[in-house]
Amino acid sequence: ETGVTQSPTHLIKTRGQQVTLRCSSQSGHNTVSWYQQALGQGPQFIFQYYREEENGRGNFPPRFSGLQFPNYSSELNVNALELDDSALYLCASSLDPGETQYFGPGTRLLVL
Amino acid sequence: GIQVEQSPPDLILQEGANSTLRCNFSDSVNNLQWFHQNPWGQLINLFYIPSGTKQNGRLSATTVATERYSLLYISSSQTTDSGVYFCADNNNDMRFGAGTRLTVKP
């Protein structure tokens, strides 16, 4: 039990639609990071937020965007969904950037 | 960016056996972490080990930062150890290896 929760657990969308995934960090954790994990691969870093500001971004297009709120919750938004966006999306929280990250259970997204 | 290589990619053990998983990095590591991903996708923190050796029960890890590698030791393996083991360099944008898939047979 990491204290990090994500919703929904599973989601099915069609190509071209938009999706919002949610994460609730451990209380007191100022940093949240989002990852995409395709089947059979390691997680790939999407971006990180620290105190509600973006603090780093991986090699993902602008249609992947995020928000972090003062109540330790955050969102990952993906516009114009593509089939290749089908994956497990993980969020992780930490006290500060560079410190131990604790992962949520993930949201499995299927794009048809 | 830093490249992370894990070996072996797959490992099948009989219950009770010991194993060593390796993680090599292409550049200096700052904040190495080891994770276990269970069959439901949950990533569980095993070790935060930028250098030195740590032990937690049947698991231990050693990182030699100057030589850019880390080792995870699993002793007396159990079926519940099955899953995928990842190492990652936690340098803001955490870089994961491709993982080692461990299967422990009863």
Image: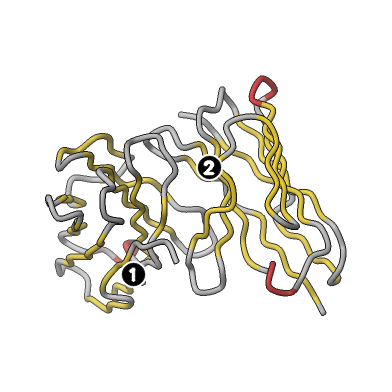
Residue under label 1:
A107
For label 1, the SS is strand
Q: Nearer the viewer, residue B62 or B83?
A: B62
Q: Residue B27: x, y in percent?
A: 56, 24
Chain label for disc 1: A
Check the picture and name the quadrant holding the N terminus of chain A.
Answer: bottom left
Question: What's the mark number on residue A42?
Answer: none
Q: Look at 12% across and 50% down and name the residue there.
A: A70
Q: Residues within 10 Å of mark 1 (few under 14, many from 20)?
A: many
For badge 1, the amino acid type reads Thr
Q: Residue furthest top?
A: B66
Q: Look at 55% across and 34% down and name the residue there.
A: B3
Q: Nearer the viewer, residue A18 or B23?
A: B23
Q: Residues within 10 Å of mark 2 (few under 14, many from 20)?
A: many
Check the picture and name the quadrant holding the C terminus of chain A.
Answer: bottom left
Kindly check if marks 1 and 2 are in contact, taking CB atoms under 8 A apart as contact: no
Task: Establish if B78 lies above or below B60.
Answer: below
Q: Mark 1 to mark 2: distance in Å? A: 21 Å
Task: Establish if A20 lies above or below A74.
Answer: below
Chain label for disc 2: B
Question: What's the mark number on residue B88?
Answer: 2
Q: Residue A30: x, y in percent?
A: 25, 43
In the image: residue A109, left or right of residue B38: left
Q: Examine the image and state in which quarter residue B61 appears.
A: top right
For badge 2, the amino acid type reads Ala
In the rendered image, residues at marks 1 and 2 fall on the same chain: no
Q: Nearer the viewer, residue A27 or B104?
A: A27
